[in-house]
Amino acid sequence: MGLPTKRYERKPAVLCHEGDVGDVEGCAWLIQKVADANCPKGSLPLDPLYVASREVVDGEPTAWSGWELVDNAALCLNPADLKAEATTAFKSLTVKPSAIKVQPAGGQVLINMPTITYTDAVAETFDISLGEGDQKIPVQVEAVPKTFTWSYGSEEGDEGFPLTTTDPGKPYPDQSVTHTYTHKGPATLDLTTTWTGRFRIQGIPGDLADPDTWTTIDGQATTTSPTVHLNVYEKRPHLVEDTLG
């Protein structure tokens, strides 16, 4: 990659009064242009964009020129402008798998009795930047768990058929996702979580709980939780000799 011949930077319109941004032929019109941008709700107001240039002669760069205004540069950044890049970034994020929780605990469960399974349905948040060079925009990306696919595998029987639900389950006594093993012996419990994504431009006012604050990311991500190993056993009643009082 060769040496860059252009660089861009956004600067407040009032800086042209200080002669820092080259010949803009006065500032009043530029300040008014920024004031009239009237960015819609959910978009980010931007400072005017300036460019400096230089030449590279025989592999050696000349000095940078003064800053010049890029007339056609947008003054409002809409989430839609970043959606494709946010979608690409979402695919590269490392989402932490949901932890598997089982009741009864300890890896011992009973045959012909409901085994309670559940997980924490907690969204994961990532602070990243989109764009290139001086034009990077800070955004917040959120991965939201959508579906949970449980596999209750055992060495015998048909317990391996997966169960997919939007319910992450709950512990006793409010259990909502259970499985009843019908065979004794070792079993493995697996969980695959499907995540949807959304993002917001940081610095824009808004209630984070308000869906309108966020823009949906296309596609999904999946995670596989560490396998939990179980032992399914049968508890039999036994008669014992005792003196009835």
Image (cartoon, rainbow, N blue to C red):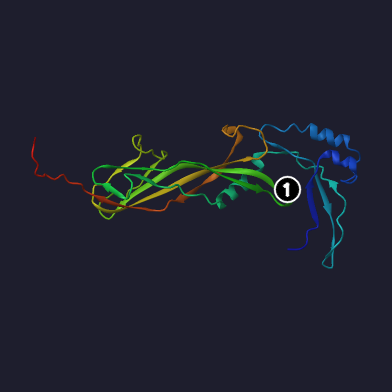
Place of residue 191 in the rendered image (x, y in percent of width and height, measured from the top left): 40, 48
Looking at the image, is 45 positioned above or below residue 131? above
Residue occupied by mark 1: 135
Place of residue 71 in the rendered image (x, y in percent of width and height, measured from the top left): 82, 42
Residue 101: quarter of image:
top left
Place of residue 90 in the rendered image (x, y in percent of width and height, measured from the top left): 57, 48
Please identify the residue farthest to the bottom as the structure is shown. Answer: 58
Depth order, front residue of 141/68: 141
Lateral position of residue 156 relative to residue 176, left or right: left
Place of residue 8 in the rendered image (x, y in percent of width and height, measured from the top left): 78, 50
For badge 1, the amino acid type reads: Gln
Instruction: Identify the element where label 1 is drawn.
Output: helix
Q: Could you tell me which residue is drawn at 74 percent across and 50 percent down?
A: 134
Give neighbour class at mark 1: few <14, some 14-19, many 20+ (Cα, 10 Å).
few
Please identify the residue farthest to the front as the structure is shown. Answer: 245
Looking at the image, is 33 positioned above or below residue 183? above
Looking at the image, is 131 positioned above or below residue 47? below
Lateral position of residue 50 relative to residue 193, left or right: right
Quarter of the figure with the C terminus: top left
Lateral position of residue 195 relative to residue 101, left or right: right
Quarter of the figure with the N terminus: bottom right
